[in-house]
Amino acid sequence: MKIVIYIRDAEKNDAIIHYVDIISSELSHNSNYQVEFIKYIRVLNPNDIVLVISLQSYFRLLLKYPNQKIIFWFQGITPEEVATSYPGLYSKLKVPVFSILEKIVLKKSVFNFFVSNSMLNHYQAKYKYNKDNYMIMPCFNKAITPNSFYYKHKYESASFVYAGAIIKWQCLDETIHLFSLLKEKFKNATLTILSSDQQEVMPILKKYNINAIIKYVPLEELEEELAKYKYGFLLRKDLKMNHVATPTKLNSYLANGVIPIYSDVIDDFNNLFINKYFYIKINIDNLTKAIDDICTFEKKKIIVKDIFNEYSDIFNKYYNETEYRMKIRNAINNFFPL
């Protein structure tokens, strides 16, 4: 039997590829399955099981092969994302369609991958999803890098980094605004923005009268670059799409000893840092308190061994790739048709 992984070029990025590679490599361990990547659905066989990673791709599949067996990776809650990103007529037309597609997927799928417990709860509440054909695996693509924690003078100055695309919902404007207020407290504070969208950054920096280093770093050099910074920004607004998300950015920061300054709206991360010490959780609607919390944390002495041990514990329990691989193998035995 063949399991086909259907990913269009437009859907590819580094986080997706790593996540899918984990799934595909574990499927390949089972001698009953042949695993193959495809870009076009015309090459499918009706007996194939298809891994799909977006509702857009599933819609194409549904039109041509309505009875195809599918495995679905829910990266996000698409109707809510569309409603947030494209307000107006587009949203009114598309949101009901995507909601119907989500409901169909949950009803017909052989197996589902969710990125958080909050996402599972969302689907249980919205669609009365009550099956057990799923597993939860957060988004991640990095293992912990011990050397990054011992970068010279890493924790001795207020160095801040933002790594990611310049997309409105990733809150770069709010990030730079927050840094501009921090700059009033820490005159020697620095901000580095790691992004390929450099032209999009300049107007925001000008708006807040902030100087920052802007540069693009290839993925293979990201660990070496992130090792230089003490703090990393991961801000989000209070939206349902953010409640259920597990942004890969946190994984990249923690893997390299970067202390996250993250929004309190990400449900999984709030649970992740219970009984932890090296993090700063803020509300972007209350920047006065956010500044106070960051200033208080900045006064603390950091022992490298302590922060490494704490983040190692997170990787052992939350970003444990070996454990997720075992869960996938168990899922193959329990849910996949032979």
Image (tube, rainbow, N blue to C red):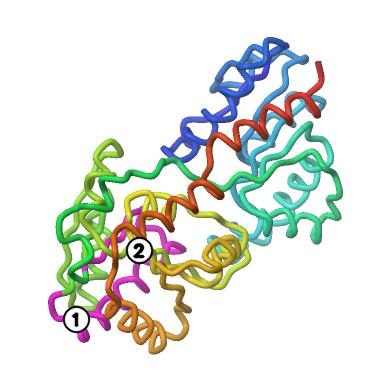
Is 171 included in the stretch rendered in magenta? Answer: yes
> Element at badge 1?
loop
Q: Residue furthest bottom?
A: 288
The quarter of the rendered structure image containing the C terminus is: top right
297 relative to 19, above or below? below
Magenta range: 159-188
Q: Quadrant of residue 291?
A: bottom left
Residue 168: image location, x then y, percent? 42, 63
Under mark 1, the amino acid is: Phe
Residue named by callout 2: 259
Could you classify mark 1 by the number of other residues whose Cα lies within 10 Å: few (under 14), some (14-19), or many (20 or more)? some
- Residue 186: assigned label: 1
Q: Please state which of residues 75 and 335 is positioned toward the viewer in this rendering.
A: 335
State if disc 2 and disc 1 touch (CB < 8 Å).
no
Residue 170: image location, x then y, percent? 43, 62
The quarter of the rendered structure image containing the N terminus is: top right
2 relative to 84, above or below? above
Question: Which residue is depicted at the point 79% across and 59% down?
Answer: 126
- Residue 9: assigned label: none
Q: Is 295 placed left or right of 190 in the picture?
A: right
Tell me which numbered mark, 1 or 2, is placed earlier along the sequence. Answer: 1
Residue 209: image location, x then y, percent? 18, 78
Nearer to us of marks 1 and 2 is 2
